Amino acid sequence: MTEAAPTPPTLLRPDSRALPLLTLTDLRIAESQSAAVLPAHTLMGRAGKAAASFLVERITRDTSVEKSKQRVWLIAGPGNNGGDALILATELHKAGIAVELCMPVDAKPDDARWALDAARAAGVAITAAPPASLDAYTWLVDGMFGIGLTRSLEGVFAAAARLLSQRTQARPRTGGVLALDVPSGLDSDTGTIVGDGGSAVRATHTITFIAAKPGLFTAQGRDLAGAVTVAPIGVEYKARGAVQLNAPELFAGFLPPRDFATNKGTFGSLAVVGGDTGMCGAPILAARAALYTGAGKVHVALLGAGAPPYDPPHPELMMHAVDDLPLDKMDALALGCGMGHGERATRVMHDVLRLDVPKLFDADALNLISKDAALAAEVTARGAQGDPCLLTPHPLEAARLLGTDAAGVQRDRLGAARALAARFAGVVVLKGTGTIIAAPDGRLTINPTGNAALATGGTGDVLGGIIGALLAQHLPGYEAALAGVYLHGLAADTLSAEGHGPAGLTAGELAPMVRSLLNRLFYPPTQP
């Protein structure tokens, strides 16, 4: 009787999945619970084999270099991350792939000692120091330190991190740099580099065990981790209030149906309020984005003088002086683009906060709130009364709202977003790489879409218009933020894939792509 082949490890790509993102505390609990019921060394064995499956598949698929000529170099730290690397090296060696493992410091935990014994017994080549050059190796593996690192990389490990990062930055056409669990030196909770002035590995790929981690998807983590793959290794753990990765399944059910028997009133009226004298471009950019995102009617309410009577590219936009438009009749309001900081802007903010209409505050509106205690109190009061406002700050605006600095916000983006949502009893979109969406009830989501193409003027205005249009279509604030941020980033990703970014993409190019994606993903044509 032929013995059944072993089941290959489960490997998940986060693409379009609302994956839970576990913090260090969650992961330690999950590890402890699993270790209590599994035979010794099981989790480490599974992690190493999952990483081996990942690499063998890529090595086999790479036709540019014969498998017999592929060489893998691994560096192992003294802890369990190093143990994972040892098991990986052992499995690759058994698969007939040439490996060399560098272990500058002896393994310390029992699991890692077990892995070291297994590697030696299998005949894995183990050295104590890195070679003078890593050019002979197709794949490099970072198994130095995983989650829970509390100090900067030092000595041989810091030097190895530089060597591995140099390979990634050279953009290799074959092979790459694989980080085990998280790139060494990266804080898995925050996405920042551990220690003042510390360094971290920049990988082309990361295979992360048990579950994905928040730090892989925000702050510096997105650049350092590269393409992320999740290996659950048979551990099931549901953390209460876990951070999630944004995906269509979280908001698709809230998008309105586009039935035949609908009209422009069905999809709501949005007013984009802003545009002091000489600054009407920003609200017009936001309003155009709202049109492309499906709002039924879009108004532009301008504070300043000298604005154009209509928008020639989009005469569908209805232009008004702010005092001439009944804002209380709108289905949603988006305020702040080019609004300025004058007395009139402050008066408009106070007036709007008395209205029972969903409200989004961006740009100058956020700066007014940060400088005016009465405005801030009114925003908080609206949320306490069950009408949460939606705030969309970038890190500097978030810092002003929290009374700190941008560096402090970036050191703990999740914490900053959570604090803002609590402070203002509202929904917060903390923009930046790995944009974070926070709700006052504690929900936190990190968005995986978007790239450097968004690092240009006006893209924030476009995002405000997109989310405003979704509010006008009666999406709840949190889901409108999830959908808007996801589509905004996906538009940049799609345009970049087509050669229109990341360099030189303009904000105005995003909205037509958002329309295409919205229809392609959520409103496919009815089949006859």
Image (spheres, helix red, strand yellow):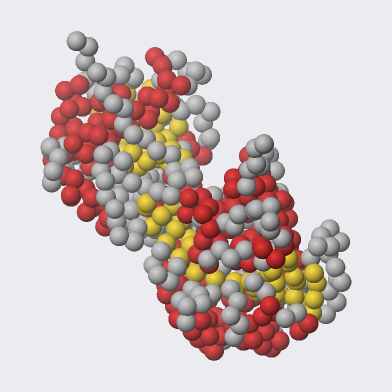
In front: 157, or 223? 223
Observer able to see residue 125:
no
x, y (%) of residue 423?
44, 78
- Quadrant in the picture for residue 244: bottom left
Q: Is residue 174 above or below residue 369?
A: above
Location of residue 271 in the rendering, given as x and y in whole percent from the top left corner? 70, 72
Q: Is residue 398 above or below residue 194?
A: below
The image position of residue 378, as x and y in percent, is 53, 85
Q: Quadrant of residue 194?
A: bottom left
In the picture, measured across the screen, residue 172 lies left or right of residue 277, that is left
Q: Nearer the viewer, residue 497 or 502?
A: 497
Quadrant into which the C terminus falls? top right
Residue 42 position (above or below residue 348):
above
Most foreground residue, 447 or 148: 447
Identify the residue at horizontal 15%, vertical 29% (top origin).
117
Q: Is 2 left, or right, of 499 in this rendering?
A: left
Give the number of marks.
0
The image shows residue 89, relative to residue 462, as above or below, that is above
Quarter of the N terminus within the rendering? top left
- Looking at the image, residue 168 sits to the left or right of residue 120; the answer is right
For residue 138, say whether it is visible: yes
Residue at 50 percent across and 64 percent down: it is 478
